Image (cartoon, grey):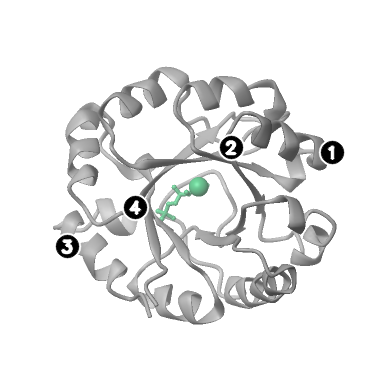
């Protein structure tokens, strides 16, 4: 069954050459583009905001997977939907009223995801799992591209997969941070079906080939 989505993270792209990077991704086998939004508060880094997202949207033919690493994301959901987000993922740690936030994302016509930091247990998703379309397991501490993969993330993916299976619903299981050919297979075996890859794709000599190699890992 071919059920693997590769989502290159635009954070690792050449921002001075964003149009060409976006067109390159259009011609790739990646189904999604992963968009990392950082506010300098929830995470110790600032990435980019709406103008850059609009610029990507203008040129992309891909599904936009928006990962919000921001405090109080409910303030900006509509603007992200208007800027072309098809899936909006918020961090459980940033949302005291996660159920309401999820409903707001869905009311905007977007898929809704919840991300968990490395220190947040999968079990905290139990009450909301039936309401969401995607679980995002962070395999690095969010804030920067190019970090080292945290090995116990594989166990969290397995645990999330079990929780998802109990629902009987098709819920995406995404992994983000330090993903490469070295760990992709074990993540897929554990149940991941969306792999984000930033530096592994964009720092490689041939990003199109790197994406294609990852896509071919589909079982
Ligand atoms: C980290 C971001 C990731 C990052 C992945 O906070 O959420 O999406 O861009 O980059 P790599 O694949 O280089 O770890
Ligand atoms: Zn991300």
Query: In front: 92, or 191?
Result: 191
Q: CA distance from mark 4 to mark 2?
A: 19 Å
Q: CA distance from mark 2 to mark 3?
A: 28 Å
- Left or right position of 70 against 199: right
Q: Earlier in the sequence, mark 1 or mark 2?
A: 2
Residue receiving disc 3? 209
Quarter of the figure with the N terminus: bottom left
- Left or right position of 160 against 154: right
Q: Residue at x 74, y 65 (%)?
A: 122
Quarter of the figure with the C terminus: bottom left
SS for callout 1: loop
SS for callout 2: strand
Residue receiving disc 4? 31
SS for callout 4: loop
Q: Residue at x 73, y 28 (%)?
A: 72
Residue receiving disc 2? 68
Q: CB atoms at circles 3 and 4 under 8 Å apart? A: no
In the picture, residue 159 is in which quadrant? bottom right
Q: Residue at x 59, y 63 (%)?
A: 170
Q: Earlier in the sequence, mark 3 or mark 4?
A: 4
SS for callout 3: helix
Say few, some or many: other residues with alpha carbon within 10 Å of mark 4 (under 14 / 14 to 19 / 20 or more).
many
Residue receiving disc 1? 96
Q: Earlier in the sequence, mark 3 or mark 1?
A: 1
Task: Give x and y (percent) for residue 20.
Answer: 17, 34
């Amino acid at each position: 069954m071919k059920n693997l989505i590769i989502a290159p993270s635009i954070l690792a792209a050449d921002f001075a050459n964003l149009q060409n990077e976006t067109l390159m991704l259009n011609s790739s086998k990646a189904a999604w583009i992963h968009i990392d939004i950082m506010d300098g508060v929830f995470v110790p880094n600032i990435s980019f905001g709406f103008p850059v997202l609009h610029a990507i949207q203008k040129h992309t033919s891909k599904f936009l997977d928006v990962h919000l690493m921001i405090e109080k994301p409910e303030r900006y959901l509509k603007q992200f939907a208007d800027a072309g987000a098809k899936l909006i993922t918020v961090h459980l740690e940033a949302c005291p009223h996660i159920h309401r936030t999820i409903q707001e994302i869905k009311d905007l016509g977007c898929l809704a995801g919840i991300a968990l930091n490395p220190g947040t247990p999968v079990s905290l998703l139990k009450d909301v799992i039936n309401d969401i379309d995607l679980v995002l397991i962070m395999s690095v501490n969010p804030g920067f591209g190019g970090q080292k993969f945290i090995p116990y993330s594989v166990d969290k993916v397995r645990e999330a997969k079990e929780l998802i299976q109990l629902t009987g619903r098709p819920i995406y299981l995404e992994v983000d941070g330090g993903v490469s050919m070295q760990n992709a297979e074990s993540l897929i075996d554990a149940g991941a079906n969306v792999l984000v890859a930033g530096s592994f794709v964009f720092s490689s000599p041939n990003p199109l080939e790197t994406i294609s190699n990852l896509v071919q890992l589909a079982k």
